[in-house]
C-alpha cells in the first residue's frame, strides 16, 4: 500500500506511514508465540487497508488497518492523535481479525490481489484464499496435468 508500510519481524508487525519520512503508527507484538513460531511474510490487499501475515508454522494471520484511534493495539510513544494531526497524519492502528489454517501448512504465498491470496502448501497444493480466509480454489499436486498451458 502507498498509504502505509507494514514491517514484519519474527515476533511483531508494525504499521508506518507510507510517506518519505516514516512515522510509526501502530505496533502489534504477538503474545501467543510458542515453539519458535515466527512471522515470515506480509501480504497487502491491493487498494485496501487489509493485510495477511504468513507464520513459520503455516498459518495466515489477517489484520485490518483502522483509521482513527479505534482498535485495541498499543500506540507507540510520540504518536498521539494530537501529535499526528500536527504533522497532517491521520492516526491508524492494526486490528487482528482472525487466523487461517489448513490441514497442510502454508509454506509460501506468492500472489495477492484484491480478491484473494495464492499460497503453496506443505502437501504440494496451490490454494486460493479469499481475504476472509475461505478456500476459493484448491489445485492438488496430482491435478497438475489438468492445468497445462
Image (cartoon, rainbow, N blue to C red):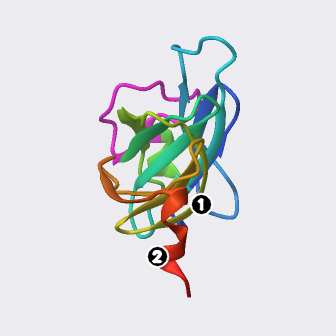
Dot 2 or dot 1, earlier in sequence: 1
Q: Residue furthest bottom?
A: 149
Which residue is nearer to you in this view: 80 or 121? 121
* Disc 2 packing (10 Å; few <14; some 14–19; many ≥20): few
Q: Who's the residue at 59% across and 50% down the image?
A: 124
Q: Residue 127 lies in what quarter of the image?
A: bottom left
Tell me: residue 30, above or below residue 137: above
Report x, y in % for residue 63.
Answer: 41, 41
Q: Main secondary structure of the magenta part?
A: loop
Q: Residue 54 lies in what quarter of the image?
A: top right
Q: Is residue 16 visible?
A: no
The residue that disc 1 covers is 18
Quadrant the C terminus occupies: bottom right
Which residue is nearer to you in this view: 89 or 43? 43
Q: Who's the residue at 70% across and 34% down the image?
A: 9
Tell me: residue 111, above or below residue 13: below
Report x, y in % for residue 28.
Answer: 53, 28
Residues drawn in magenta:
66-82
The residue that disc 2 covers is 146
Left or right of 117, for residue 76: right
Report the number of discs: 2
Q: Who's the residue at 41% across and 41% down the image?
A: 62
Amino acid at each position: 500500500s502507498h498509504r502505509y508500510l507494514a514491517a514484519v519481524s519474527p515476533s511483531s508487525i508494525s504499521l508506518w506511514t507510507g510517506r518519505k519520512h516514516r512515522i510509526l503508527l501502530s505496533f502489534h507484538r504477538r503474545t501467543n508465540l510458542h515453539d519458535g513460531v515466527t512471522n515470515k511474510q506480509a501480504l497487502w490487499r491491493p487498494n485496501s487497508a487489509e493485510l495477511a501475515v504468513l507464520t513459520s508454522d503455516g498459518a495466515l494471520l489477517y489484520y485490518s488497518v483502522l483509521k482513527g484511534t479505534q482498535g485495541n493495539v498499543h500506540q507507540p510513544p510520540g504518536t498521539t492523535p494530537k501529535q499526528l494531526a500536527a504533522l497532517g497524519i491521520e492516526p491508524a492502528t492494526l486490528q487482528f481479525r482472525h487466523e487461517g489454517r489448513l490441514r497442510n501448512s502454508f509454506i509460501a504465498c506468492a500472489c495477492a490481489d484484491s480478491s484473494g491470496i495464492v499460497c503453496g502448501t506443505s502437501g504440494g497444493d496451490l490454494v486460493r484464499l479469499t481475504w476472509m480466509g475461505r478456500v476459493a480454489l484448491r489445485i492438488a499436486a496430482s491435478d497438475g496435468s489438468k492445468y497445462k498451458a
